[in-house]
Amino acid sequence: MTALFALATSLLYGLADFGGGLLTRRIPALTVVVASQTIAVVVLGVIVVATGGWTEWGPQLWFAVAAGLLGPVAMLAFYKALAIGPMSVVSPLASVGVVVPVAVGLFLGERPGVPQFAGLTVAIVGIVLAGGPELRGAPVQRQAILLTLLAAFGFGAVLALIAEASSNLTGLFLALFVQRVTNVAAGGTALFVSVKRGGAALPEGTGLRLIWAALPALAFVGLADVAANGTYSIAAQNGPITLAAVLSSTYPVITALAARAVLKERLRGVQAAGAGLALVGTVLLAS
């Protein structure tokens, strides 16, 4: 069950990242984040009311609030790093955030066997390589590296926090709702500040018409991201956190394959090698 839900998380994260990447080519990144998460808030609100999830209110929801605050910070740091540094360095480096939930699992006393430790190592190397790191070229700015590491820590911390925010399914719906409300509040504040400083909230020329036309895609990105958080929480609660974290973090493979299928982008040799290593690591972890 843990492996199944963790791999579902990887699929959902990979598709959400791919969809979000396509949207940010036409719509400001902050607007994509706020709009997609607002749709998720509405859907989750309906689910919480329908399932009676509000009865699960308790102090554990502070973990969801923390995850909701860290998420936009990590995303903004990631986008800023992409703006000033090469994507071929930033993207794979950001995936090393997997070490945060893995460290949490080890701290809590999980002790994987030799095949699992080998799987952890192989899969993490594969995850980084699947992003297509640039092995040659101009030096990368120190600020880009620091921002990417901040994003990686944030992404990993969100996984660890959301797993602690609930203990059952209805509680998980409420935790995800609280997380997304916090996401929208934090992201909306950042968008407001950006606009006050002269940034754009809407695409030039097309404006709201493009946002309206993109609603289905925005809904997919927001709901896929929510579903990924949910499946990861279920995976982490029903098995070793180390297993759930690493299998969930193989999503760069999914993103690369989606780009190959939809955009006809060719996989670089290092990406193909990374995908293969991630698959080998997955088999070892699930053994």
Image (cartoon, rainbow, N blue to C red):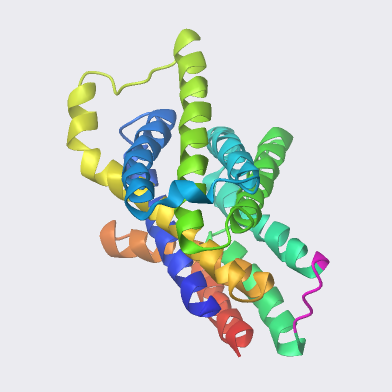
Of residues 130 and 150, the one drawn nearer to the viewer in this rendering: 150
Can residue 85 be seen in the rendering of this structure? no
Q: Would residue 110 be counted in the magenta stretch?
A: yes
Of residues 266 and 197, the one drawn nearer to the viewer in this rendering: 197
Residue at image coords 62%, 76%? 239
Q: Would residue 224 be counted in the magenta stretch?
A: no
Q: Is residue 262 above or below residue 77?
A: below
In percent of width and height, residue 10 lies at 47, 65
Quarter of the picture holding the C terminus: bottom right
Residue at image coords 64%, 40%? 66
Residue at image coords 56%, 51%? 91
User: Horizontal placement of 266 versus 120: left or right?
Assistant: left
Q: How many marks?
A: 0
User: Horizontal placement of 216 versus 256: left or right?
Assistant: left
Q: Is residue 108 above or below residue 118?
A: above
In percent of width and height, residue 27 lies at 33, 31
Residue at image coords 42%, 66%? 11
Magenta residue span: 107-112
In percent of width and height, residue 13 lies at 45, 58
Q: Main secondary structure of the magenta part?
A: loop
Occupied quadrant, residue 100 = bottom right
In percent of width and height, residue 181 lies at 47, 35
Can residue 11 be seen in the rendering of this structure? yes
User: Horizontal placement of 239 versus 204: left or right?
Assistant: right
